[in-house]
Image (cartoon, helix red, strand yellow):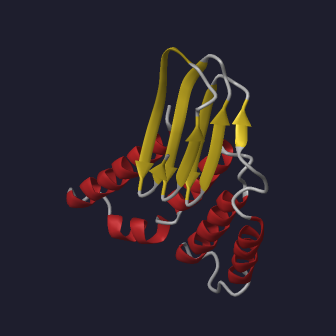
Amino acid sequence: MNWARAYVGIVIVAVGALLLLDNTGVIESGDIISRWWPAPIVLGGILSWFANRRHWVPPLIIIAAGTAVLLRTTGVVDDLGVLLPIILILVGIFVVFGRGFGTRAVVDGDSINSFNMFSGSELASHSRSFRGGKVGALFGGAEIDLRDSLPAPGATLDVFVAFGGIE
């Protein structure tokens, strides 16, 4: 399963279901959406971290910022006075150290998998029987180097991009 494709599809289905329930008079979706809109951002950050553990700084910033806004929109925290400086510190760390504290990730296995949200990744495979993989980018990107690999019969690379790019 391509996590980026599934994530975007689930968010679209959820919003559509909320609007349908609102139009049929079952619930008031405006209040739900206005309170919980940061939740998909937090979930996207978590998925991005699980997919790219080597690139943990951007997902951490996404999770922290989304959580801060979610705490504010749900009324748990009235003032972002403490959370905003923490987010700024995390953004500063990202600026200092870049996308992922290292260089291009070389994949030893026969497949590649990556999900990037508001971030990017650089992947290279040297596999002699490359089987493919799944790469997704949502407001982010990925650079994939397969020049030193040989595709296995039937190899496929499932790519999904929304507001980003993959090379």
- Which is nearer the eye, 25 or 124? 124
- The spot of residue 129 in percent (x, y) is 62, 16
Q: Quadrant of residue 21?
A: bottom left
At horizontal 72% and vertical 64% (from top left) the residue drawn is 98
Q: Quadrant of residue 60?
A: bottom right
At horizontal 48% and vertical 30% (from top left) the residue drawn is 157
Q: Relative to 13, does residue 133 appear above or below in the rendering?
A: above
Any part of residue 113 in sight: yes
State left or right for residue 130 relative to residue 15.
right
- The spot of residue 163 in percent (x, y) is 41, 58
- Which is nearer the eye, 1 or 93? 93
Q: Quadrant of residue 80?
A: bottom right
- Which is nearer the eye, 35 or 165? 165
Q: Relative to 73, does residue 129 appear above or below in the rendering?
A: above
- The spot of residue 32 in percent (x, y) is 41, 65
At horizontal 45% and vertical 56% (from top left) the residue drawn is 164
Any part of residue 28 in sight: no
State left or right for residue 131 relative to residue 33.
right
At horizontal 52% and vertical 66% (from top left) the residue drawn is 38
- The spot of residue 54 in percent (x, y) is 74, 47
State left or right for residue 7 relative to residue 54.
left
Q: Relative to 142, does residue 98 appear above or below in the rendering?
A: below
